[in-house]
Image: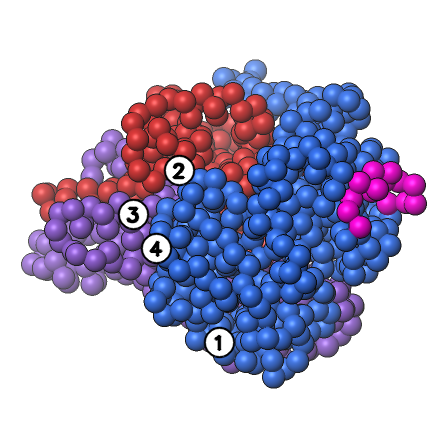
Amino acid sequence: MFCKQPLAFWKYCIHLCGLSCLYLFLACGKQEELNVLNWSDYIDETVIKDFEKEFNVHVNYDTYTSNEELMAKLQAGSSGNDVVFPSDYTVQALWKQALLEPLGDSGVTNMKNVGKKFKRLYFDPKNRWSAPYMWGTMGIAYNSKMITEQPESWDALFDQRYAGRIVMLDSQREVIAMALKYLGYSMNSTKASELEEAKRILIGQKPLVLAYTSDNYKSLLVSGEAWISLAWSGDASQAFSENPDIRYIIPKEGTNLWMDNVCIPARAPHKELALEFINFLLRPDIGSRLSQKILYASPNEASYTQTPPDILNNSSLYPPQSLMEKCEWYEDLGTANQKWDLIWTEIKG
Amino acid sequence: MSAISLKQRLNPAWLLWPLCLWLGIFIILPLCILIVYSFSKRGTYGELELAFQFGNYAKLLQPVYLRIGIRSLYIAGLSTLLCLILAFPISLIVAFSKPRIQKILLIALVLPMWTNLLIRCYAWVYLLRSEGLLNSGLQMLGFIREPLPLIYNSFAVILGLLYNFLPFAILPMYASIEKIDRRLFEAARDLGAGNWIIFKKILLPLSLPGISAAVLLVFVPSMSLYIIPDILGGGKTMLLGNLIQNQFLSARDWGAGSALSVVILLLILVIWLLAMKVTGRKKLEELFS
Amino acid sequence: MLPQKFFLFLVFLFLYSPIVILILFSFNDSPFSARWHGATFKWYGLVWKNSSLLLTLSRSLLVAVVSSFFTILLALPAALVSARAFSRINGSLRLALMCSLILPDLVMGITTLTLFSCLHWNMGLHSIIVAHVTFCLPFAFFIITARLRNQGIALEEAATDLGASPMQVFFKITWPNLRPAVWASLLLCISLSLDDVVVSFFTAGPSSTTLPLKIQSMLKIGLNPQVNALFTLILICIVLIVGICAILKTPWKPKTIS
């Protein structure tokens, strides 16, 4: 009764139903799962595989590209993630909005491996919500072949001689904080006069800037397109491994200290497994492997005995105490965030 | 039997309901959420406090936002214009080719659209930067001595927008031109009309629906695309899309971001309604094929 | 003819030079893609061995195909009614579809995620599919409606006069004429779905990373030959699919009955 065309139509339908069934089948996990959401390129894949083997689970590993994206995602709704990696002030903003699960008093036994100076920081005074993962600084990365004299101060980023070869991070927090520090103010300043001054010098700097980018500055430095850049410590080490001319310094005015942490979002479906994962990451051997793979500084002091000395002695990753004293942690700006945002818009707009 | 009842018999009204239901849940509800957000207040840590206040809309009246809005309109407008100027002759050539060639040309022109935009943007970076292929090539051939500043500026942004949206402009214009009865041109020539008259009095008016659709398909997304200004513009050109992204992410001011989105939505709906009026409803939809 | 051919050549040069560069550098024997260091196939080998990459590719294809299918399923019946029978709902329907078209990706992603949370839905591949269907709907609807308006109802009337049932009328007359528009919508929806980053990020559940998201994270370290190789492979797939469609003689434009 039906001619060929309806048959063909129903064939399409059946094929697609088949595909959907396949998807449903694939979606049904047989093992327990852990859903990890981390920055891209921020873990050693073999560590995940070892965790899967040891605990007989499957780890779903997804990535994001900024703290703000993570925050927006968690603010908009629970998306089923068990472990996330927010930075310092983001941790504070998250737990103040009740978006994190407490780690529990006896939850993370390997917290003892973390160095004292990395625990009980301002954003989480009792380490109730977060465990330290990686830490670092922000500084100046430069091409030592093109810039023969080592920059000592933040003013190198405002130097007319490097016009068109300066790259800044595309992040309002980092750029404005740098300007404030250069002017001698606190990186967390909310005073209108200080912010105005910072805005003025940054608008003056804009014609010298090649680009504002948080992702591409490494490849711009490595390729020689850019000579000098605002940079994060770990990224600079990675750039150095690709191009030995790239150096990293922390200016004499001091800089910011940042800490990335492991947290469990509220309503995480696999909280116990997440705690195991955090404990796993804090093991000395794992901490050492992570540090060696992603070339960032680890707060896991128990892992230092297993970390090669050339990483521990790398002053860009582990700056000397004298410089550390000049560094500040970021704090959440609260309502002053809007003031900063307006300045950023005026600089970029 | 009357035509209306036949149409209704063949296409009963209940066929509309699945789509209406879907739109109701997945577009209208999120839009309502957006409008509610646009009146909300921002809490200390960026959380939303439900309220009814116009502060977010008032915030948009600040000079820096207006400046960004005008610049976005200018850049989106300029790239749309360039797209149209380039797409029109292309569509003409394709529409007047042999049918078999038409198919091949269309697919070849539209194929780039199916590949990943992000990767293509990075490819343009390789082409345009000072040690990139274009500059190196020109220097090698002796045309220039110093590399041209082709990237991380407005030129690169407009180039990127033009590159991305050209196929979107070609399709509706081609569809519109293709439908024009060729005998009109023959008749005009027989009556002694030159090329310019044919263009002004026949080609342009009859391809207006295609042009309007092309304007919509290019202008609307150009305003809110943020990838191209970020990658090709070096983050130095802030357009409305970047501004919205900023408000929702770094500034954590969902209220202001929502208010801005609502304003853009209303602005574009107004433009669309004007376009509908100018070209007549039916012609506007005929071109999408 | 020559100026026309030269002009077209320039246009194709403009459209394809980035693509050609990407393909060429996928054979570059250097991980930084800046200079040519000799030809190699090793990046293709790496892509092939990269099981997570292939998994996200298959996931993206699945999402693209399924969401395109459901888009057509929703848009086609509504387009039939909207284009033929006048209905008061028409205006508001088009308005709602235009809103979907205009809304920036980021806003759509965040509000859709908020909606899903309010409804207490678990996120996963299905949430991405729902979001993709939503933003593909305007394209499919407007394309199919345009085609329908172009056709006119004369043939269907004639068939009904001759005693055909509505189902027969649809399958023997309407559907064959609609097929090009439906294929065009399908291809457009698949391309939109495969390229979407922002909406996918917000509506993805765990282990629902799609290919564009994966590419974005791979591009964090800059353009590397592995991404080039992946891009070339995807391009080859697309060309093959289009070629197969062409061979199956699906006309881009229907044969008009005059």
Spot the residue most to the bottom: A193
> Per the image, is A114 magenta?
yes
| Secondary structure of the residue carrying numbered label 3 | loop
* Residue displayed at 44% across by 40% down: A242
Left or right side of C156 for A26: right
B152 and B212: which one is in front? B152
Residue C201: percent from the left, percent from the top?
Answer: 62, 45
> As shown in the figure, which amino acid type bears the numbered disc 3?
Gly
For the magenta stretch, what is the residue range? A103-116
When the figure is inspected, residue B64 is found, relative to residue B245, above or below; the finding is below
Mark 3 vs mark 4, CA separation in Å? 19 Å
* Residue displayed at 62% across by 42% down: A312
**What numbered label is drawn on residue C32?**
2
| Circle nearer the N terminus (4, 1) | 4
Q: What color is chain A drawn in?
A: blue
Label 1 CA crowd tier, 10 Å (few <14, some 14–19, many 20+)? some
Label 4 CA crowd tier, 10 Å (few <14, some 14–19, many 20+)? some
Mark 4 vs mark 2, CA separation in Å? 20 Å
* Residue displayed at 15% across by 42% down: C5
The answer to whether residue A164 of the structure is visible from this angle is: yes
| Secondary structure of the residue carrying numbered label 2 | loop
Mark 3 vs mark 1, CA separation in Å? 31 Å
Which image quarter holds the N terminus of chain B? top right
**Mark nearer the viewer, 4 or 2:** 4
**Mark nearer the viewer, 3 or 2:** 2
Q: Which residue is mark 1?
A: A201
Circles 4 and 2, Cβ within 8 Å, touching? The answer is no
Q: What color is chain B drawn in?
A: purple
Residue A125: percent from the left, percent from the top?
Answer: 84, 58
